[in-house]
Amino acid sequence: VNLVESGGGLVQAGASLRLVCAASGRAFRSYGMAWFRQVPGKEREFVAGINWDGSTTDYRDSVKGRFTISRDNTESTVYLQMNNLIPDDAGVYYCAANLPADADYIDQAVSNYDYWGQGTQVTVSS
């Protein structure tokens, strides 16, 4: 599956952004999807994940209540709605896909994702 992110940008603290991940390829609805982010000098970290039908989601603690992940299997698209952004949210955001053994399990490990997009930059000014 090929993944292309969009929607990043430069915003002030408190603003919102919606990231979009457009997927192409077969059987999108079979994949678990996630958003990761990375800043220079740090490891890529899990931000949010969603299972194949959207019935299960998971978030890192620092974004709970502010970010929402969703998917539209008819459009092969995953979204990350980010509200009340803070400077610590900045980084390159990557969309990722995997085929978990348990269809309802959301994996937070970078190494367990098979497909990645090219990333989209999010910058938050204070």
Image: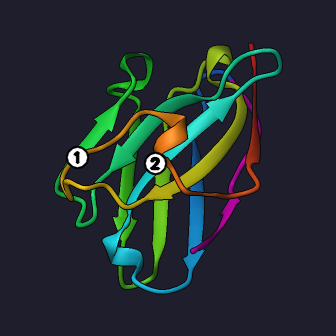
Q: Residue at x 76, y 55 (%)?
A: 118
Which amino acid type corresponds to the residue marked 1 in the rendered image?
Answer: Tyr
Q: Nearer the viewer, residue 63 or 45?
A: 45
Q: Residue at x 22, y 46 (%)?
A: 105
Which amino acid type corresponds to the residue marked 2 in the rendered image?
Answer: Ala
State how far apart marks 2 and 1 are (Cα).
12 Å
Quadrant of residue 108 within the rendered picture: top left
Magenta run includes residue 2: yes
Q: Residues within 10 Å of mark 1 (few under 14, many from 20)?
A: some
Q: Position of residue 83 (x, y in %)?
A: 49, 34
Range drawn in magenta: 1-12
Q: Is residue 46 left or right of residue 94?
A: left
Quadrant of residue 72 within the rendered picture: bottom left
Q: Is residue 107 left or right of residue 122?
A: left
Q: Is residue 26 left or right of residue 54?
A: right
Q: Is residue 51 left or right of residue 1?
A: left
Q: Secondary structure at mark 2?
A: strand
Give the numbered dot on residue 105: 1
